[in-house]
Image: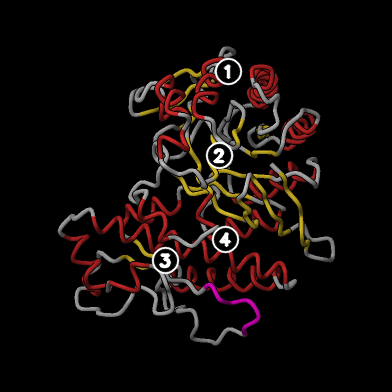
């Protein structure tokens, strides 16, 4: 793996654009990791992945704990790893122990032997040796070390323990890795403690890792705490290696992460939108353009998304977004999506996930364009201001 920073916003800003090179694939950053269930997005099959904009859609987050039951890890290894099993030789698979859908960290059951996760099969304790056996069988391009993620409300003593365990497990994982950390992302934890976050980031930086995964966010922390945590952690990490953060999904949260210097984002935002019947509609081509007063609807209607279950769309023959080039918008209408959702047809989720994924990947492309043209601060400020204006109008 190779990573290079190609552009940094001036005036002391941290937002940066870069290129992540893995094998023959190059991904521009900031970028989004698509969340998966056993290797594929929840409603997008292997053949439909080709309808998503390349190369941005090549990054997939896979969760090793999804494969603890079936198929057996030995079977995956005999097939040749996840790339061969899924039929995705050109995709970049990044493995991390937990996710926000089916493998939630259970800090109260985690102990010195391993990390605990809530899964559909019950609570599972994952030890470093078990985790590395899964990693060696799956053969992902990159993998994050096992970590003790804790929510924001735990004590300072528990934060300290989480850092000590995570560092110990990182050393154990690297020792069991045949590549000795060459494809490893060290995890930065510490809950809401700024001191422990800095300590963990500093110590992980001393290890032989290829990048950093800032974990434990989105577990009860406030927006103010999250901003302080991100900046504290990033300030202790080297500039030449990529940084990834989990559970920052909302557009404004992504912009906050980019402003702090994050390169990769792991999020279940698209999945949650799709399950709720929502479609993203916010404008993504804001770079270099002066927004008109009516570009955003501040009358109390959410400008970021629409609920296609609503009866107002029963006879709406327009596309979800007129300018969108995704398969869904090119072939179907809001009225058709409304019908599919209300008769509980699974095709609704398939079409919605295609659109939402396409739209969000284009949003990341706009972020990169804003950084390259040194307009990211204006881009972010404009988006957040209009989002706040909507919320204020909705309250009134």
The answer to whether residue 45 is seen in the rendering is yes
* Residue on which the image places disc 3: 280
Q: Residue at x 20, y 62 (%)?
A: 340
At a point 45% along the width and 79% down the height, the residue shown is 297
> Residue 328 occupies which quadrant of the picture?
bottom left
The answer to whether residue 247 is magenta is: no
Say if mark 3 contacts mark 2, CB within 8 Å: no
Name the residue that disc number 1 marks.
128
Q: Position of residue 164 (x, y in %)?
A: 70, 20
Q: Nearer the viewer, mark 4 or mark 1?
A: 1
Where is residue 73 shown, x and y percent of the image? 43, 22
Inter-mark Cα distance, 4 to 2: 24 Å
Q: Who's the residue at 45% across and 68% down the image?
A: 304
- How many other residues sit within 10 Å of disc 2, few (<14), some (14-19) or many (≥20)? many
State left or right for residue 343 relative to residue 185: left
Q: Are the residues flagged by discs 3 and 1 in contact, CB closer than 8 Å?
A: no
Q: Is residue 213 above or below residue 73?
A: below
Nearer the viewer's eye, disc 4 or disc 3? 3
Could you say which disc has been placed on residue 252 in the image?
4
How far apart marks 3 and 2 lie (CA) works out to: 26 Å
Q: Nearer the viewer, residue 288 or 324?
A: 324
Q: Which residues are magenta?
A: 284-289
Q: Which residue is mark 2?
A: 94
Spatial distance from mark 2 to mark 1, Cα to Cα?
17 Å
The secondary element bearing badge 1 is classed as: helix
- Is tag 4's residue or tag 3's residue first in the polypeptide sequence? 4
């Amino acid at each position: 793996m190779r990573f290079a920073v190609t552009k940094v916003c001036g005036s002391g800003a941290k937002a940066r654009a870069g290129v992540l090179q893995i094998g023959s694939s190059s991904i521009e950053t900031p970028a989004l990791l698509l969340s998966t269930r056993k290797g594929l997005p929840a409603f997008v099959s292997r053949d439909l992945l080709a309808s998503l904009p390349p190369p941005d859609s090549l990054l997939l987050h896979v969760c090793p704990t999804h494969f603890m039951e079936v198929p057996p890890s030995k079977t995956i290894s005999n097939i040749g790893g996840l790339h061969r099993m899924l039929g995705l030789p050109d995709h970049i698979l990044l493995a991390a122990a937990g996710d926000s859908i089916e493998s939630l960290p259970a800090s109260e059951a985690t102990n010195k032997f391993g990390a605990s996760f809530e899964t559909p099969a019950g609570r599972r304790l994952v030890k470093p040796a078990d985790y590395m056996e899964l990693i060696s069988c799956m053969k992902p391009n990159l993998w994050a070390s096992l970590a003790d993620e804790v929510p924001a409300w735990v004590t300072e003593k528990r934060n300290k323990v989480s850092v000590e365990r995570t560092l110990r497990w990182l050393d154990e994982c690297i020792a069991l890795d045949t590549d000795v950390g060459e494809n490893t992302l060290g995890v930065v934890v510490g809950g809401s403690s700024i001191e422990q976050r800095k300590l963990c980031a500093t110590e992980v930086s001393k290890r032989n890792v290829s990048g950093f995964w800032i974990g434990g966010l989105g577990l009860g922390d406030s927006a103010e705490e999250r901003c302080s945590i991100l900046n504290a952690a990033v300030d202790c990490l080297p500039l030449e290696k990529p940084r990834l953060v989990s559970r920052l999904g909302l557009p404004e949260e992504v912009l906050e992460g980019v402003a702090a210097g994050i390169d990769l984002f792991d999020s279940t935002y698209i999945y949650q939108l799709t399950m709720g019947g929502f479609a993203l509609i916010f404008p993504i081509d804001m770079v270099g353009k002066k927004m008109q007063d009516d570009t955003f609807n501040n009358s109390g209607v959410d400008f970021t998304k629409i609920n296609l279950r609503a009866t107002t769309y029963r006879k709406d023959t327009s596309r979800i977004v007129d300018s969108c080039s995704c398969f869904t918008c090119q072939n179907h209408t809001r009225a058709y999506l409304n019908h599919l959702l209300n008769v509980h047809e699974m095709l609704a989720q398939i079409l919605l996930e295609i659109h939402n994924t396409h739209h969000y990947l284009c949003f990341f492309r706009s972020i990169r364009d804003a950084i390259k043209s040194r307009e990211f601060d204006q881009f972010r400020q404009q988006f957040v201001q209009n989002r706040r204006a909507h919320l204020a109008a909705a309250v009134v």
